Amino acid sequence: MGRTSVRQKRARPLLAAAPILAALILCLLVTPVSAAPLTVATVNHPLQALAERIAGDRVEVLFPLPEEGDPAEWRPNAETVARFQAAELVLLNGAGYARWTGHVSLSLLKLVDTSAGFRDRYLKDDGPGHSHGPGDSKAHRATVNIIWLDLGLAVEQARAIARALAAADPEGEEQYRANLAVLETELLRLDDRLRQLGTQLDGRPMVFSHPVYHYFRNAYGINGRALHWEPDVPPDAAAWRDLDALLVGRPARLLVWEGEPDPATLVALEAKGLTSVVFKPAANRDPEGDFLAVMAANIDRLDAAVNALE
């Protein structure tokens, strides 16, 4: 009987292992590799909150702005611009908000203008306007861009976000639709509360500390005029004169602030018969919670103040 060669003896273990290796390779080929979540960048906190509510855990939503400051006027550094560039979608507010996005390189295919569907309902600032020099006889009024204070328009922004997410991630469309339905219900419940408050006020005048409430005023029938006061800056003599001029013929009893005002200012306003109430625009992150939580707290405070007038 012939002897098996050393080469043949060494080959047998390899031949025996071949089916196992083939099975492992096949397993690697057919096992799906979990894709990284979709990354979406936003230019303000309301859009961040709406996107997070709609997307759930399928999407990473970025709002890489500082905790302080106004996102509408903020300008990002190169590192932050790179984060926006790396995102699959960039959610814009529209109406000229976050103008920096027009001065950096962002793919047009990534940009989602969440208010594009209602551009015909943009409001113009009803202040004195501005001109472009002595030869310009027309006053130009800026488009107002704090859209989300009309919660009906915030619903439309949410729908635009859901459509964009579904287009970018078709497998998540059912989840996005379901989450949008829940979000719409919550937003419209808050919207209804504000409409009831507008009806209850019945045209009684109020004063706003700053001209940021145009959509709020327009949506809920609020008879309000605006100052240019900052919550953390005590009004000087000129500011008090502005208030007195605003109150002539308009006996307002409520002054609505963007943030908590200086205590001494509160006392002086009370002496004039004005009650202060904080109604935050919520453009940036807030300790009270996300956009919807802040709006609910705003409405609670306004409701209490309005009912105290009765």
Image (tube, rainbow, N blue to C red):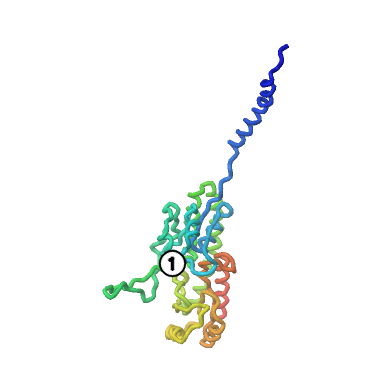
Q: Residue at x 66, y 23 (%)?
A: 11
Which image quarter holds the C terminus?
A: bottom right
Looking at the image, is 282 positioned above or below residue 248? Answer: above
**x and y percent of residue 182 in the render?**
56, 58
* Type of the residue with mark 1: Asn
In the image, 259: left or right of 250? right
Any part of residue 76 in sight:
yes
Decide if residue 244 is on the left or right side of residue 285. Answer: left
Position of the N terminus, as image quadrant, is top right
The residue most toward the left is: 135
Q: Quadrant of residue 245?
A: bottom left
Residue 152: horizontal and vertical position, in percent? 48, 64
x and y, in percent, of residue 31 in the image: 60, 39
Residue drawn at the location 56% of the way across and 46% of the way down: 35
Does the rendering let one see residue 249? no
Q: Looking at the picture, does residue 114 appear above or below residue 194?
A: above
Q: Quadrant of residue 308?
A: bottom right
- Is residue 108 or residue 14 the one in the foreground? 14
196, 152: nearer the viewer: 152
Foreground pick, 27 / 16:
16
Kindly indicate the quadrant of the structure image that contains residue 183: bottom right
Closer to the camera, 281 or 76? 76
Helix, strand or loop at disc 1?
loop
Farthest-out residue, bottom: 271
Residue 118 % position (x, y): 41, 61
**Disc 1 marks which residue?**
145
Q: Residues within 10 Å of mark 1 (few under 14, many from 20)?
A: many
